[in-house]
Every structure is written in C-alpha cells, then in structure tokens.
Amino acid sequence: MINYSTFQIWLVIALVGAGTFFMRYSFLGAIGNRPMPPWLLRILRYTAVSVLPALAAPLVLWPDAANGQPDPARLAAACATVVAGVMTRSALAAILAGAAMLSLGLYLS
C-alpha cells in the first residue's frame, strides 16, 4: 500500500480538477457561442441519459458485495429497472421498481 502525504493528495485533486475544467472549457469555449447543427444537438441530449447506466453497469455486473461475481438479485433489479423505465417512461418508477426488486432479491437470498 502506498502512503501519500496530505499535500500529495490535495495536489492530485487540484490537478485533476484543473484538467477537468480546462478540458470542458476548451470544448465549450471553442463552440459554446456558435450555432450547432441539429444532429449534434440531438446527440448531446442523450449524454445525461447515458451517464447513469455507465455508472451503474459495473455495480450490476461486478458488484463488490458479491466479490466481483454477477449476483442474481442485482441482475434482476437491473432488468426490473429497465422494464419499468421503458414501460412507464418515468425515471422515478424505474428507480422504485429497481429498488423494490433489489430489496426483494437480497431478502430472498
């Protein structure tokens, strides 16, 4: 295990924050005030929707709670979330369905 000093940790946080800021600023500063084509605007609308599945997929497929092995309760919860989201087109209904299925699956296992 590597021990970092407090200064090193804050230095890494500051550098990562600056890198993230300048990466986003370079994109938004370059084309932020110019009109964008409709196809690009349509693609950009799906960015927020794609972030949540990208964050949740590793937690479903390789959960730490199951030592990195796929868990039927989490897979069922992911399926319930997707089905509820597609059928109702409501994020709240999808979240509640997934939470209920995960609770039920963990209770039964």
Image: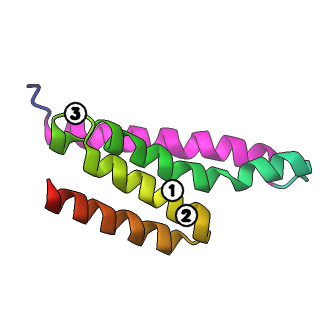
Q: Position of residue 7 (x, y in %)?
A: 20, 40
Residue drawn at (35%, 52%) of the image: 76
| Residue at x 13% of width, y 36% of height | 5
Q: Which residue position holds label 1? A: 82
Checking the image for residue 85, the label placed there is 2
Question: Could you say which is closer to the camera, residue 84 or residue 46?
Answer: 84
Pointer 2 and pointer 3: residues touching (CB < 8 Å)? no
Which amino acid type is marked by label 1? Val
Q: Is residue 55 visible?
A: yes
- The amino acid pointed to by label 2 is Gly
Which disc number belongs to residue 68? Answer: 3
In the image, taking residue 36 as reference, residue 108 lies left or right, namely left
Q: CA distance from mark 2 to mark 1?
A: 5 Å
Q: Quadrant of the N terminus?
A: top left
Q: Nearer the viewer, residue 33 or 62?
A: 62
Name the main secondary structure of what is drawn in magenta: helix
Q: Could you tell me the amino acid type at mark 3?
A: Gly
Highlighted magenta segment, given as a residue range: 5-32
Residue 109 x/y as whole percent:
14, 53
